[in-house]
């Protein structure tokens, strides 16, 4: 199996390689729906190369109006050769400049922003009506997948709303509560290899801010404040924790 492959092509799906980054499963879910061979960005980030396929795509969440750090590095350090290139950037409330940032690094024929449930539970909790929001997300996704399938052109518009999430959070804000049962799931789902299981999970200072650890912890034991400990958690219900772990664990795909 190719390094980093975290999902096989579905029967009848268009012939495409999709590079995916996810925290809580929304982007993985979207990438699967579009179809193709899914490659986990965290699992290939350390091996820059040239990728070539008929169609190449990128599916990732927007962080703080811009690209996740790892997606930015991945786009900048590899070469992509394709007849058609697309990107789908997931967001929840504010459409920012993640796509614009990617388009400045990789030429894109098509870019779409996909509204999806909120997972940045440091700021506020996941929505009560995540199921409703997911139904809308799926309907938009069907349209996007059909447009990509017919190789539609959709230019990425310039955006002045390009930000950097790294400015306002770092993993030293996470505290591990006594509720921790040392199951290790937080370390398994971390796309940065940033959590080491010692007596309890320890953070190594290279956080990507995906919030997989805090959202997926079965004990809600990872919080930065009392307020955050009360925030509702989120995981895309169609993507199991084991699937996020398989896609994100840095030990896999090597
Ligand atoms: C650190 C961080 C920053 C985020 N910034 C934004 C943002 O600028 N605008 C927005 O609408 N959603 C933002 N979100 C929400 C995610 O983009 C959204 O929940 C996405 O669907 C998560 O995808 P995933 O499940 O694949 O991780 C942010 C989430 C995180 C964790
Ligand atoms: S996922 Fe939660 S309970 Fe499990 S080791 Fe991590 S912090 Fe502890
Ligand atoms: S430490 Fe947590 S928030 Fe940071 S990259 Fe790892 S899983 Fe994501």
Image (cartoon, rainbow, N blue to C red):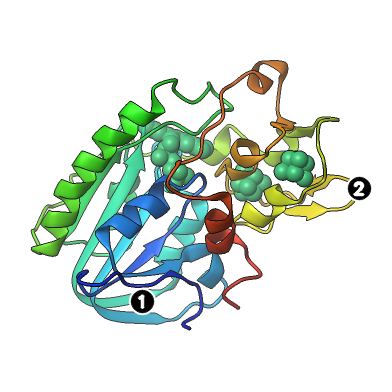
Rounded to the nearest whole Å, what is the CA distance between mark 2 and mark 1?
41 Å
Tell me where residue 168 sits by quadrant. top right
Residue 225 visible (yes or no): yes
Helix, strand or loop at label 1? It is strand
Q: Identify the residue at image location x=52%, y=50%.
A: 240
Q: For disc 1, does the CB lie below 8 Å from ligand 1? A: no
User: Mark 2 or mark 1: which is in front?
Assistant: 2
Helix, strand or loop at label 2? It is loop
Image-based side of 60 in relation to 186, left or right: left
Q: Identify the residue at image location x=58%, y=44%.
A: 212
Q: Is residue 230 above or below residue 110?
A: above
Image-based side of 146 in relation to 77, left or right: left
Residue 156 visible (yes or no): no
Residue 182 rendering spot, x and y as whole percentages: 82, 45
Q: Where does label 1 land, which residue?
A: 79
Q: Identify the residue at image location x=43%, y=31%.
A: 118
Residue 233 rendering spot, x and y as whole percentages: 56, 30
- Where's the C terminus, which quadrant? bottom right
Tell me where residue 180 sits by quadrant. top right
Q: Residues within 10 Å of mark 2 (few under 14, many from 20)?
A: few
Q: Earlier in the sequence, mark 2 or mark 1?
A: 1
Tell me where residue 146 sits by quadrant. bottom left
Q: Where does label 2 land, which residue?
A: 199
Q: Identify the residue at image location x=11%, y=53%.
A: 154
- Residue that extends furthest to the right in the rendered view of this protein: 199
Image-based side of 170 in relation to 147, left or right: right
């Amino acid at each position: 199996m190719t390094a980093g492959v975290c999902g096989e092509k579905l029967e009848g799906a268009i012939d495409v390689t999709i590079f995916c980054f996810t925290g809580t499963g929304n982007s993985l879910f979207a990438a699967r729906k579009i179809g193709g061979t899914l490659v986990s960005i965290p699992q290939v980030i350390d091996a820059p190369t040239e990728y070539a396929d008929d169609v190449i795509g990128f599916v990732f969440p927007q962080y703080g109006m811009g690209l996740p750090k790892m997606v930015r590095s991945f786009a900048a350090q590899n070469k992509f050769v394709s007849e058609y290139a697309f990107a789908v950037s997931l967001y929840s409330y504010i459409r920012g400049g993640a796509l614009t940032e990617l388009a400045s690094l990789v030429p894109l024929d098509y870019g779409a922003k996909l509204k999806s449930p909120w997972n940045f539970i440091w700021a506020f909790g996941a929505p009560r009506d995540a199921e409703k929001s997911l139904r809308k997300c799926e309907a938009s996704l069907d349209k996007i997948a059909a447009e990509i399938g017919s190789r539609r052109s959709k230019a990425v518009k310039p955006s002045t709303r390009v930000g950097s999430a790294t400015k306002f959070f770092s993993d030293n804000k996470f505290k591990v509560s006594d509720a921790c049962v040392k199951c290790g799931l937080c370390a398994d789902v971390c796309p940065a290899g940033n959590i080491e299981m010692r007596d309890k999970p320890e953070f190594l200072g290279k956080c990507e801010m995906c919030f997989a650890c805090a959202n997926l912890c079965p004990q809600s034991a990872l919080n930065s404040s009392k307020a955050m400990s009360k925030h509702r958690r989120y995981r895309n219900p169609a993507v199991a924790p084991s699937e996020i772990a398989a896609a994100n664990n840095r030990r896999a795909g090597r």
